Amino acid sequence: MPNSADYNPFPPAAMPGYQQPPAGYGCRWVWHPQPRPGEPAVVLFRLTLDVPCEATVPVRVSADQRYTLYLDGQRLGRGPMRGDLGHWNYESYQLHLSQGKHLLAASVTWFPQDGAPMAQMYGEPGFLLLAEGPWTNLLSTGSAPWEVTEIHAFTGRADTVSWYYVTGWCFTMDGALYPWGWETDPATVADWKPAQAVAIPVGDGFHWTADYETRERYPQHHLQPAPIPPMLEEPRHVGTVRHAQSAAPDATPQTLRRQPVSLACNDATLSLRWQQLLDNGAPVLVGPHSCLRILIDLDNYYCAYPMLVTEGGAGAVVTMGWSESLYESADARSDAKGNRGEIEGKYVRCVYDDFILEGGQGRRYSTLWWRAGRYVDLYVQTQDEPLTIQDLYWHETRYPLEMEAALDTGDAAFDAVRPLMFRTLQMCSHETYMDCPYYEQLQYVGDTRLEILATYVSTHDDRLPLRAATLFDQSRGYDGLTRSRYPSRVPQVIPPFSLWWVCMVYDLYLWRGREAQVRQMLPGIHAVLSAFGAGIGADDLAVAPNGWNFCDWVPEWNAGWPPDARFGASAVLNLQYLYALDRAIYLLRQFGQLELAGHWSGVRRRLAAAIVRGFWVPSLGLIADDLGHRFFSEHAQCLALLTNLFQGSEQQRLLAGLLNAPHLARTTVYYSHYLFEALYHVGALDKADKRLSFWRDLPAMGLKTVLEQPEPSRSDCHAWGAHPLYHAVASYLGARPTAPGLSRIRIAPQPATFAQLRGRFPDGRQGFVSFDLDFSEGVHGVIELPEDLAGEFVWRGRRSELKPGSNAIARD
């Protein structure tokens, strides 16, 4: 039996077990010959080439944990895309090689559990490059003479700015220990060693085994091509100097940041010099033994790698912190921020990276991972040498998500906040969706479903939505439930989020089709339904599953748990189960799984009856949250409406209770999506206008992105709050698919206070649905559909056919 080092790292299909590599196969994972297991490492690899004639060489590259690939000093890309060990990604590149000598190089970083972001899963460190065709043995790691060295320029530390901050270490970079020019000149590093092939043990991704005789488990890294495009990385020369201050030479960033910002201390001349640096790259000279503090407002929210270019200033320290906002108090327990555009009398509380300058010319300092926020708090402390800041700019990075839709509602306040909502969506879209880019960078099911819906009405690109649905399917545990967030080193279970995943798959099918991928997820849907079904008792109600049954950040609910969502029967959880059952049954019928559909239809019927028996309070016209009828929420009423628990007069009573009962626990930013859904469902969307004021007011609060929750909010950038982008199209315009893949459409407007709806949204293929509707007196206008799309228009109960092409909507 061959050694595990012979494992073929690029299998033709994702399958468990061992595969004999082809004869002469020359690709291996490699690492430093003197590894330090469990220790942080920044390792450089290089391969010198002498190419006899011009060639284009396709290569596939991966690493554990992260790599940056260079050819002759030019960065080709970063990776690999985050995943888990059973679904580890590689990227493909085309190396365009002219005749002559070239240097192929890569830097690879690996950090242990306390240093890596929570979203970064990992195994043993390694680097892997496979060149295809005749170049395999000439360029591939494990075959070609790759060399390696470890550098010690980066020291990590666990800074924190919140009770839950899990995006990884901050770093001190010592420029004197960094081998400047290593990616272009091999002579800059003397301590190169031959890279050593590393054995890849067989394991389940978490526990390793040397049992090579049984091939029943996945290899440590089971490779697959990255399913999404590379992240955007564009230089941005942006920012406004809001405060510039010279301090005593013995001042420190620690002492200065404990003081509130005072505009009375602003040095106008210094501020102008730094503004010219930001605007046009005019260098700034900082004299010896100086201490400066520069506060930069990027004028928008950015996720970016900072780029600091320096000359001289050996021993100087530049400290750079990123913050979403300034705070009204220095007390870390307070989230009060006030107007986000105001800085006077406020405190900067953030995490910082330090750059110790080496003193050379044209040195470019940056971070190992991108930073996020609106404000950059910069400190410069020089020693005996003067320092020239030659440039300071930012490489914005994110998923290449761009707005393809357009909308004019005639409501200036709402139209003004739409770009802000889309910016939030962009900032939370990277290698996965994220709840927030600043504090967690984790892809949660509940957040992601709403982000995906906003994506569907904004762009044709559905690769990130498909990746999200697939990752959550892959995350399911022995209990059948998805993990609440994925990828994540620490598994977390929020059972209601598994139900939202079922709805996410339903959304994917209706809005984008993706039949083959949805079919593969049907067993997972059945597993989730079964996990909840296992808790159904004699009363036909499901008891709360084990886990954190979070539903919404309602102030009256402890840690987001609705009443009785820990151990008892919760109306909110049972109704959400009912809601997911409806969507699962539809999918099962669509794919011909009629026996399963019939089974779950029976469960649904009995569950609906049990919910009415147990939670309906006729005297109040409300669904209670608990069987004791002590607590009531908008959440339960919304879900009862969405699941058609009642019809006719009882439904109207329930709607009246939702709108008028004074003692209901209210939906917050996240769950208000389901409030809007419920009101649209029963034709009462005009009642949501007051709730839209939360979004209309955001620009006046100085915000550039949407808050996580009503003030005081921890996060200023939370894309679950971008869901009005979806509702503008799907609810106010009322445009929704009525057949898979948006192959048929229903447009049933509920414009509420909007006098007009003009614009377009993508159909998910190559076309757009365009509309120009006026609601000043009834409705009239034009709807234009792509040539392969038809549907119906519904207005005040009247239906008319929509055909491909232009459709005139006559005044009613």
Image: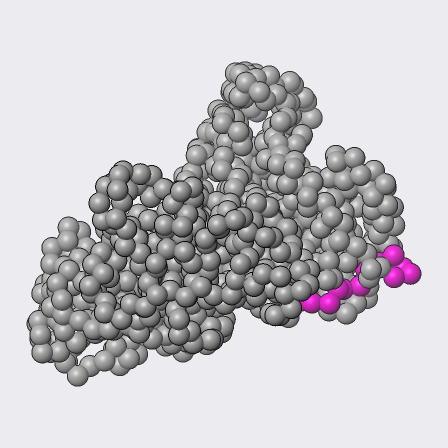
The C terminus: image quadrant: top right
* Residue pictured at 79% horizontal, 67% vertical: 568
From this viewpoint, which residue is outermost toward the right? 538
Q: In the image, is 527 to the left or to the right of 675? A: right
* Residue pictured at 54% horizontal, 18% vertical: 787
* Image spot of residue 485 (x, y percent): 58, 60
Q: In terms of secondary structure, what is the magenta stretch mainly?
A: loop
From this viewpoint, which residue is outermost toward the bottom? 250
Instruction: Report which quarter residue 664 is drawn in.
Output: bottom right
* Magenta-span inclusion, residue 371: no
Count how many numbered circles sit on residues in the image. Answer: 0
Q: Is residue 183 visible to the viewer in this orientation of the structure?
A: yes
Q: Is residue 647 above or below residue 282?
A: above
* Image spot of residue 267 (x, y percent): 13, 67
Which coloring applies here? Answer: one colour
Q: Is residue 433 visible to the viewer in this orientation of the structure?
A: no
Q: Is residue 109 above or below residue 247?
A: above
Which residue is nearer to you in this view: 87 or 307?
Answer: 87
Which residue is nearer to you in this view: 435 or 197?
Answer: 197
Q: In the image, is 504 to the left or to the right of 648? A: left
Q: In the image, is 266 to the left or to the right of 745? A: left
The N terminus: image quadrant: bottom right
* Image spot of residue 745 (x, y percent): 62, 27
**Highlighted range, magenta:** 537-552
Q: In the image, is 546 to the left or to the right of 505? A: right
Which residue is nearer to you in this view: 747 or 47?
Answer: 47
Which residue is nearer to you in this view: 681 or 89?
Answer: 89
* Image spot of residue 229 (x, y percent): 44, 44
* Residue pictured at 56% horizontal, 63% vertical: 3
* Residue pictured at 33% horizontal, 39% vertical: 56
Q: Is residue 407 above or below residue 570?
A: above
